[in-house]
Amino acid sequence: MSEVQNIYHTGFVVHNLDKSLDFYTRVLGMKIELGPVVLETPWISAVVGYKNVKMRQAWVGVGGGHFIELNEYVNPRASVRSDQFDRNRPGSAHVAMIVDDVIKWRQKLNTAGIKTFGPDYERESEWPRARYATYFQDPDGNWLEMVSRAPEPKHCKPH
C-alpha cells in the first residue's frame, strides 16, 4: 500500500454557493481556482453515496496546492444541522490559515459582522504551534481559524 502523498483539499457543504464564494473571495481575499460547475453524473453519485446527485461546486484558495472545495447540494437538498455551530462535537472540523497579523484579521472580520473567538495576546510556543489564533465561521457555520506562528526552524524537513 502506498503512503499518503499530500493533502488535496478540504471540502465544505454550503447552502448557497454564490453567497459562500462572496465570503471566501471578498472577505477572506481568496481566489476562485475552479468553477462554479454543476456536477450531475453517475460518478459523483457513486462518490458521495447518494442517488441522482446534482451539486454546484467551486474551489477557492491562495495557491500552494491546497484548496477549499465548496459544495452546494441541489439534490438531495438538506437543511442546516441542529448541531452545526457546536465546535466541540465529534465530527466537527475546521481549516486553519496562516496569516501575518491575526489581530488585524480579527478586527476586519468583526467589522464585517463576523463573530470571532480567541485571545488578544500572543503565547510562547514553538513551531509549528500557533502563537496567535482566532476562530470564526463562514456563512454556513463551517469553522475557520487564522493563526500566526513562530518561524520554521532550519533543521525541519521541507514540506
Image (cartoon, rainbow, N blue to C red):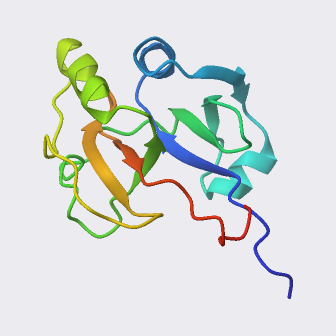
Residue 114, picture quadrant: top left
Q: Residue at x 25, y 42 (%)?
A: 134
Q: How many marks?
A: 0
In the depicted structure, whether residue 60 falls above or below residue 88? above
In the depicted structure, whether residue 119 falls above or below residue 93? above
Q: Residue at x 18, y 54 (%)?
A: 86
Residue 135, picture quadrant: top left
The C terminus sits in image quarter: bottom right
Q: Residue at x 67, y 45 (%)?
A: 66
Residue 142, picture quadrant: top left
Query: Residue farthest to the front?
Result: 154
Front-most of 23 and 125?
125
Q: Position of residue 85 (x, y in %)?
A: 20, 46
Q: Position of residue 37 (x, y in %)?
A: 72, 22
Q: Residue at x 15, y 30 (%)?
A: 115
Front-most of 156 and 68?
156
The N terminus sits in image quarter: bottom right
Q: Is residue 13 left or right of residue 134?
A: right
In the depicted structure, whether residue 45 falls above or below residue 24? below
Q: Is residue 79 left or right of residue 157?
A: left
Query: Residue farthest to the right?
Result: 2
Front-most of 128 and 84?
128
Q: Position of residue 132 (x, y in %)?
A: 28, 47
Query: Residue farthest to the bottom?
Result: 1
Q: Position of residue 8 (x, y in %)?
A: 71, 53
Front-most of 27 and 34?
27
